[in-house]
Amino acid sequence: QVQLVESGGGLVQPGGSLRLSCVASGLTFSFYDMSWYRQGVGEERELVAQIGTTWFSTIYADSVKGRFTISRDDAKSTVYLRMSNLKPEDTAVYFCNADATWLGSYWGQGTQVTVAS
């Protein structure tokens, strides 16, 4: 049974930082591209950042470039999202996704990030 468990969300003031973690189990982590998505209230889910396998290439949404950093530790089956200089518009539920074309796509349950003073 595949599980993705996010943690690290919470309430933070504008300009603050958070680090999200997503621990995966039940799959061969190194086979999967790992991504963070977010969904604000009344909004569609959007890709925030992605990190590939092997070469760990990354892509970011324009809105978070220079502020967020995605990384992975295959030995710990964990993907991270370091978020800095947070803005109120970053408020959303953040979801972890594992995707491999021939193996499937899996989602975590999400963790709430609220940026407010």
Image (cartoon, rainbow, N blue to C red):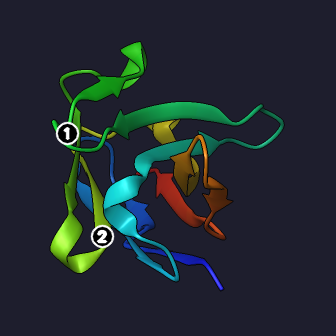
Image: 15 above or below 114: above
| Mark 1 or 2, nearer chain start | 1
Q: Nearer the viewer, residue 65 or 103?
A: 103
**Farthest residue toward the top?**
62
Looking at the image, which residue is at 31% across and 60% down? 30
Looking at the image, which residue is at 53% across and 47% down? 100
Q: Nearer the viewer, residue 18 or 107?
A: 107
Image: 6 above or below 13: below
- Distance from label 1 to label 2 (Cα)? 13 Å
Instruction: Give the amino acid at mark 2.
Output: Thr
Image: 26 above or below 10: below
Looking at the image, which residue is at 61% across and 46% down? 102
The image shows residue 25 at horizontal and vertical percentages of 47, 82
Looking at the image, which residue is at 55% across and 48% down? 99
The answer to whether 53 appears left or right of 11 in the picture is left
The image shows residue 16 at horizontal and vertical percentages of 23, 50
Q: How many neighbours does mark 1 have within 10 angstroms: few (below 14), some (14-19), or many (20 or more)?
A: some
Residue at image mark 1: 56
The image shows residue 88 at horizontal and vertical percentages of 47, 38
- Disc number lying in front (1 or 2): 1
Q: Would you identify the image quadrant in which residue 24 lies? A: bottom left
Instruction: Give the amino acid at mark 1.
Output: Phe
Image quarter hosting the N terminus: bottom right
In what element is the residue under mark 2?
A: strand
Q: How many neighbours does mark 2 have within 10 angstroms: few (below 14), some (14-19), or many (20 or more)?
A: many
Residue at image mark 2: 78
The answer to whether 117 appears left or right of 3 in the picture is left
The answer to whether 11 appears left or right of 100 in the picture is left
Q: Nearer the viewer, residue 32 or 85?
A: 32
In what element is the residue under mark 1?
A: loop
